[in-house]
């Protein structure tokens, strides 16, 4: 199955591939099937990249294609003979294929230190249908266009497309490892992580990092100019993230193991230039009672019953003097009157750390239907930040987006650009144009105005109600016109009804 270089054709390819893979799932739970499929996609990817490099080195008289160091030098994983896709495919119909794949994963981890403890190794389990497993291998044994980086990018996009669809299939639980692409894109467009250290304290499957890479590529930046740091507490999600970033060729430091960010901070001394995050909303059992003296609580001790303000202060503690952060929280974070949270919010505002608040439409997430907001926070030396001391930008974007199915909404590229351009214009970036308040959408509020609202950050309080065009037609005249039009419609309806009756009588039916 070859893949065209046409983008729309590639998207169709991803959809067809998913459709076929999903048919093979049968009654297997999506959460379990996800690891079967994504592990095989990862194996396919690194094998394809290896075999392409193997062929190139074989044609170089000064190179040794059997030397693992040759591959490491080009950021390509060494794949031993028993793990190459050609070997896997040749054995796909054998009853022991599950054990063959497990052995392949063990061999890859053995020869590539960065993948130790990352790959799934439970394909030999009895409950996994080996006939179906062989069919999935055949499905993934496609040829991806020409041998170039674009071909690898197709596999990377297939991997992400599958992540997205597994998140959808898992519903509420899917949100634990995947943030919808359009939401991630909005965060990235807001803070524009071109150069420096990027950090995500709850990185899921790595979508923030992937989108940052795509942003840099789209703006002709250099991928090598950023360093990626992350942490994830869920062990299976941590492994998904490692595989996702490996497929994208993104060097990363996610720590040597999965860990709870609050209780085992793996990046204690990190000061990040950019922070992107989608922390779990309103977590009540985060162990806050054991952290009351934590050094991160510079602006107040967060309540033990809700982690939202612990996440905020953790993020602030990781910002470099010129750092900027954009992260998602539940809407309640903007207005909670719980005493400690209200105090922390006041202190953050008075210290000029809150730069912008954006309310988003509902139904954007697989995991929850509750409405959410974006917090943008920045230190005073943040790049691209004009002198906006004592001001906060409020954007009410609840009317944006479109429904993609019965239960979920997406932001379009136009929606994302509208929000991002407004923010950058407010920041004073010339290419974004001049900023102006727009009733019902955006407002640059002074610190004094925020104080008057008792430090509540809900944009609706500041942006006002959208202006509508005045209807100059008098009420009495409008009613006369509308009733006249309605009478005409009724008359037309009666004419059509009589015509239908007449036609039916003509063929022997009386109504």
Image (cartoon, grey):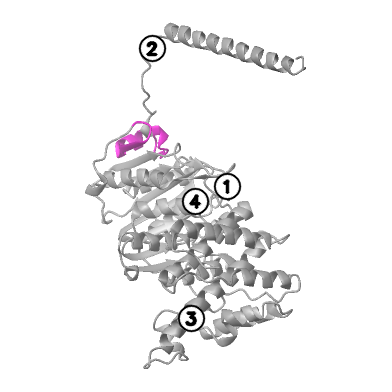
Instruction: Please indicate, yes or no, whether residue 138 appears anywhere in the rendered image.
Output: yes
Task: Give the Cα distance between marks 1 and 3.
Answer: 40 Å
Q: Which residue is mark 4?
A: 308
Which of pointers 1 and 3 lies earlier in the amino acid sequence?
3
Other residues around mark 2 within 10 Å, as few (<14) / some (14–19) / many (≥20): few
Q: Secondary structure at mark 3?
A: helix
| Residue at screen point 48% across, 70% down | 247
Q: Where does label 1 land, which residue?
A: 368
* Residue 50: assigned label: 3
Residue 459 horizontal side relative to residue 14, left or right: left
Query: Which quarter of the figure has residue 136?
Result: bottom right
Quadrant holding the C terminus: top right
Q: Nearer the viewer, mark 4 or mark 3?
A: 3
Q: Nearer the viewer, residue 195 or 418?
A: 418
- What SS does tag 1 mark? loop
Give the residues drawn in magenta, as a range.
Answer: 439-461
Q: Nearer the viewer, residue 508 or 305?
A: 508
Residue 276 lies in quadrant = bottom left
Q: Is residue 460 magenta?
A: yes
- In the rendered view, does 410 fall on the left or right side of 21? left
Above or below 71: residue 32: above
Q: CA distance from mark 1 to mark 4?
A: 16 Å
CA distance separating discs 1 and 2: 44 Å
């Amino acid at each position: 199955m070859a893949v065209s270089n046409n983008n729309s054709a590639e998207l169709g390819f991803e959809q067809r591939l998913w459709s076929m893979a999903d048919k093979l799932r049968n009654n297997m739970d999506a959460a379990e099937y996800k690891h079967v499929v994504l592990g095989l996609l990862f194996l396919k990817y690194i094998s394809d990249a290896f075999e392409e490099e193997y062929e190139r080195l074989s044609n170089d008289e000064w190179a040794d294609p059997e030397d693992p160091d040759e591959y490491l030098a080009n950021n390509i994983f060494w794949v031993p003979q028993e793990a190459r896709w050609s070997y896997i495919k040749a054995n796909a119909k054998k009853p022991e294929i599950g054990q063959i794949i497990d052995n392949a994963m063990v061999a890859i981890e053995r020869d590539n230190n960065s993948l130790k403890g990352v790959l799934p190794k439970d394909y030999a389990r009895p409950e996994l249908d080996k006939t179906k497993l062989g069919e999935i291998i055949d499905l993934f044994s496609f040829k991806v266009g020409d041998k170039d980086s674009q071909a690898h990018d197709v596999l990377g996009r297939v991997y992400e497309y599958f992540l997205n669809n597994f998140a959808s299939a898992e519903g509420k639980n899917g949100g634990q490892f995947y943030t919808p692409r359009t939401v991630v894109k909005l965060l990235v467009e807001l803070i524009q992580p071109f150069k420096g250290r990027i950090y995500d304290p709850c990185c899921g499957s790595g979508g923030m990092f992937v989108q940052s890479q795509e942003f840099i590529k789209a703006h002709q930046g250099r991928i090598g100019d950023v360093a990626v740091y992350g942490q994830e507490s869920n062990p299976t999600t941590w492994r998904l993230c490692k595989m996702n970033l490996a497929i994208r060729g993104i060097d990363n430091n996610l720590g040597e193991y999965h860990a709870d960010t609050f209780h085992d901070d793996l990046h204690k001394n990190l000061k990040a230039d950019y922070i992107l995050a989608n922390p779990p909303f309103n977590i009540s059992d985060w162990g806050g009672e054991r952290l009351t003296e934590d050094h991160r609580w510079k602006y107040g001790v967060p309540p033990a019953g809700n982690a939202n303000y612990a996440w905020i202060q953790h993020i602030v503690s990781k910002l470099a003097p010129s750092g900027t952060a954009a992260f998602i929280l539940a809407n309640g974070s903007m207005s909670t009157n719980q005493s400690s949270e209200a105090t922390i919010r006041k202190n953050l505002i008075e210290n000029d750390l809150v730069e912008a608040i954006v309310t988003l439409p509902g139904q954007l997430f697989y995991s929850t239907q509750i409405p959410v907001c974006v917090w943008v926070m920045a230190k005073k030396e943040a790049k691209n930040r004009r002198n906006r001391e004592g001001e906060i930008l409020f954007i009410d974007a609840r009317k944006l987006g479109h429904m993609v199915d019965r239960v979920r909404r997406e932001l379009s590229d136009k929606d994302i650009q509208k929000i991002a351009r407004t923010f950058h214009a407010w920041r004073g970036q010339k290419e974004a144009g001049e900023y102006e308040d727009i009733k019902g959408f955006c407002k640059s509020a002074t610190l004094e105005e925020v104080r008057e609202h008792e430090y509540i950050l809900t944009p609706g309080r500041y942006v006002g109600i959208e202006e509508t065009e005045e209807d100059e037609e008098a009420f009495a005249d409008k009613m006369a016109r509308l009733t006249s039009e309605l009478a005409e419609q009724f008359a037309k309806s009666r004419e059509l009804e009589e015509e239908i009756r007449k036609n039916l009588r003509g063929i022997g039916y009386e109504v």
